[in-house]
Image: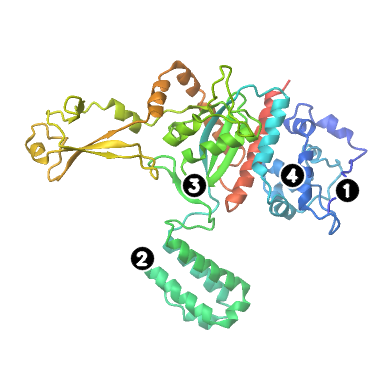
Amino acid sequence: MLQPQQTLNLSPYGHLYDLLIPKDDELRRIHDEIDMSFVYTELVKNYCDDNGRTAEDPIRMFRYLLLKVICDLSDAAVVRRAKTDLLFKYFLDLAPEDTNLIDPSSLCKFRKLRLKDLDLMNLLIGKTISVARSKGLIKKSTVIIDATHTTARAIAYTPVDYLRLRVNRLKKSLSELCEELVASFPVLPAGKNLEQMLECCKTIVELVRKEDIVQGIPAAKNHLDLLEEAMDDALVHTNLSYDKDARGGHKTVNRGFFGTKEHIGIESETGLVCAAVVSSGEKTDDKYLEEVIEQSRKNGLDVEEAIADKAYSTLANLEMANQDKTDEYGNVILDENGRPKKNFTLYSEIHTNITKALDRNDGFYFNKDAGTMTCPAGYLAIGRCYHPRNEKMKHNPGYEYRFDVEKCKQCPLRDGCYREGTKHKTYWQTILPDIQKDHIKFEKSQEFRDKMRERYKIEAKNADLKQNYGLDRANSYGLVNMTMQTALSIFACNLKRIMRLTKA
């Protein structure tokens, strides 16, 4: 139950704050300049009106979480430091003499019970964008977009190793009360054969299910359920973990990770994060461009330009960027000349695998008189097959030309062109849609080059979030908790950025 109104904390020692805490301290400025009443407004629905003990002030509890992120502290450490640090007491609206603070476990309950069912990410980002706009910081309408990764709290196991771990946990939970049952379990295979391990686990599950006494041991029942879940997951995933939402991904060919991805957009001039979406680690970056743009607009930014790397220049994203821009009622927005506005301008280089289709210098050329492709030796293709665009794989349409293999076998230029024993010789010519051709021309303009020079800012922001705000490793398991961690990290990062930009 919440107090009907917030109380003002008066203390005869309050003057110590003005004596010992500088006016320009960042934490003090955040406390004095940022109105946190929105936290109370959003969370009041998660408290009972007339039952239970009087709850801790939700604004103060939220400030505890903010201090955790800013100072990189654990739950216990932030409470312990708040007992002796005057700056922490000031930030938490405590009196200097207050020593009877919350129990650290209250912060865990606050996260799980009070912040649930809340769009915390957009709530906190929208608040910081609103503050920045009120201070006159946001003037542009350009967003820089990229994805970064966070390592999972739990390590990744192979399916065989994870099943072995689950069986051992089940044995441990049964060992005290059901020694005979545990002794009857088959010996787990020592190798890495998944089929043998699954067969062994199936036998163990059947043995345990037959014993009624197991139903009265909650820990054993839980471990049995987890073992059965692991058996199902082992048939689908190559890596298993305590964190069921974490997945393996790659930053480069030789550098992988196991965890989640954060798809982030920042405002180009101020560097403030204006949108973020958390996904599992295997997701591709380009799928989240539209969602980041839409979230940026919902959070108060009128996005007209987006800067991103090559991963975002897919045909689907180019088509989405060139759609007519509409207002909240679905009406098309017109420019000063009365023509429909584009959704936004995308500054992203098309991948070289696509541009090479236009710049191939391999000796093959299209003979317009014969109406077919000609090889470097002068032989004409004997057939042509058109392949439409593959919607599932997003492949561009193209023509596949077939050449006479018998001529290729005798050709003096066959080295590097024809491989011995090959039954077919084909040549693929990609057909680029007009929208991709136009974008390739756009890439050569000075405007495009100038915009791409700003892309480094998102790399610096990702590094800042990881090194200074704890986004390098997950604090807990699951996408829900990772989203909460990302939201608090971005909120703290944005607030400190605003304080620096407005420093007198």
User: How would you rate the neighbour count of disc 3 (Cα within 10 Å): few for under 14, some for 14-19, many for 20 or more?
Assistant: many
Please identify the residue farthest to the left as the structure is shown. Answer: 410
Residue 186 is labelled as none
**Left or right: 159, with 278 as reference point:** left
Q: Distance between the residues labelled 4 and 3?
A: 28 Å
Q: Residue 62 carries which label?
A: 4
**Image quarter (top left, top right, bottom left or bottom right) of the N terminus:** bottom right
Q: Distance between the residues labelled 1 and 2?
A: 62 Å
Give the class, few, some or many, for how many residues have Cα within 10 Å of label 2's Cα (few <14, many ≥20): few
Q: What residue type is labelled 2?
A: Asn
Q: Residue 4, which numbered label?
A: 1
Identify the residue position indicated by label 3 in the image.
281
x and y percentages locating residue 5 in the rendered image: 88, 45
Vertical placement of 84 versus 328: above or below? below
Q: Is residue 182 visible?
A: no
Residue type indicated by callout 1: Pro
Q: Mark 2 points at which residue?
A: 193
Between the residue at mark 4 and the residue at mark 2, the CA separation in whole angstroms equals 49 Å
Mark 1 or mark 3: which comes first in sequence? 1
Amino acid marked by disc 4: Phe
* Above or below for 502 versus 287: above
Q: Is mark 1 on a helix, strand or loop?
A: loop
Which label's residue is closer to the chain start, 4 or 2? 4
